[in-house]
Amino acid sequence: MIKTIKYKDHDITFYDLLESGHNIDHNIITDDLYTRPDHRFSEVTSLINKGSVVYDIGAYIGTFSIPLEIEGMEVYAFEGFPDNYKRLEKNTKPYKNIKVHLVSVSNENKSIKTQFNSCMDQKENPYREINYRVFDDYIQEHNIPNPDYVKIDIEGMETLALYGMKNLLENIRPIFQIGYHFGIDESLDGYPGFVSVSDGGFDFNSFTDLNYKVTPNLFEGWGEYLCIPNENI
């Protein structure tokens, strides 16, 4: 399915939309994509200037990346699932300031054929070769500019991926927008998903320890959280 929707005075066309499954495609089809809490861009653009570098980690099919490119940002979009990456590539092709990367961020470097939380129809989770990378290393190896704003929405994998962002967290210190999938339970072969602190997952209290202001509260449960370095407030 193909659907064109409006963002401000711009037409955005999304291709190969899914009509089933737990995914954002239905928000495109029903024309309410930009009412979602994680896709309200007035807050983002109030925090960063035009020309800022934005990382979209868990870019899916480009719903977050495209409006920010339209707003004048330099966007780097990272998607780990090959089938979604093909759609991401197709949707973002008209936008010269979006660079796409087929990679899944994690706490270790490995490639493995496995299932993956792809946000496709949950009855169909095919096995794919997934390239997991420590994100600090990946940024350096690909000479990607340091970000001003990092959006992370990776279906529970944020509990491992943030271990691979030590340099970003401690030294680069962008603003983070994190979709926290607290306790999300998946039964997918080889896919780690959400990992609790007691089982070795990232401790999100680290943000306050590193002098970030977390809103609305300190990672009290499932939801969208904004983490702003105190020096930027």
Image (tube, grey):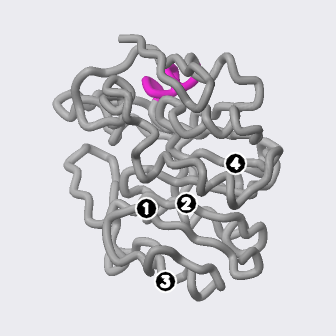
Q: Assign a secondary structure to mark 3.
A: loop
Residues at badges 1 and 3 in contact (C-beta under 8 Å)?
A: no
Residue pointed to by mark 2 = 177
Disc 4/disc 3 C-alpha distance (Å): 24 Å
- Left or right: 167 as drawn, with respect to 193: right
Camera-side residue of 51 and 207: 51
Furthest toward the left, the residue is: 123
CA gap, disc 1 and disc 3: 15 Å
User: Does the residue at mark 1 contact the one at mark 4 (Cβ under 8 Å)?
Assistant: no
Q: Is 86 included in the stretch rendered in magenta?
A: yes
Q: Is residue 22 left or right of residue 108?
A: left
- Residue 69: horizontal and vertical position, in percent? 70, 35
Asked whether disc 2 touches disc 1, contact meaning CB atoms under 8 Å apart, the reply is yes
Residue drawn at point x = 26 percent, y = 65 percent: 183
Packing grade of label 4 (10 A; few <14, some 14-19, many >=20) is: many
Q: What element carries label 1?
A: strand
Q: For the residue marked with disc 2, what is the amino acid?
A: Gln
Q: How far apart are the two marked residues, 3 and 2, measured between alpha carbons?
A: 15 Å
- Of labels 4 and 3, earlier in sequence is 4
| Residue furthest top in the image | 1
Quarter of the image with the N terminus in it: top left
Q: For the residue carrying disc 3, how many other residues have a C-alpha within 10 Å: few (<14), some (14-19), or many (20+)? A: few
Q: Give the range drawn in magenta.
A: 82-89
What's the mark number on residue 224?
1
Q: Is residue 143 magenta?
A: no
Of callouts 3 and 2, which one flags the residue occurring earlier in the amino acid sequence?
2
Tell me the CA gap for discs 2 and 1. 7 Å
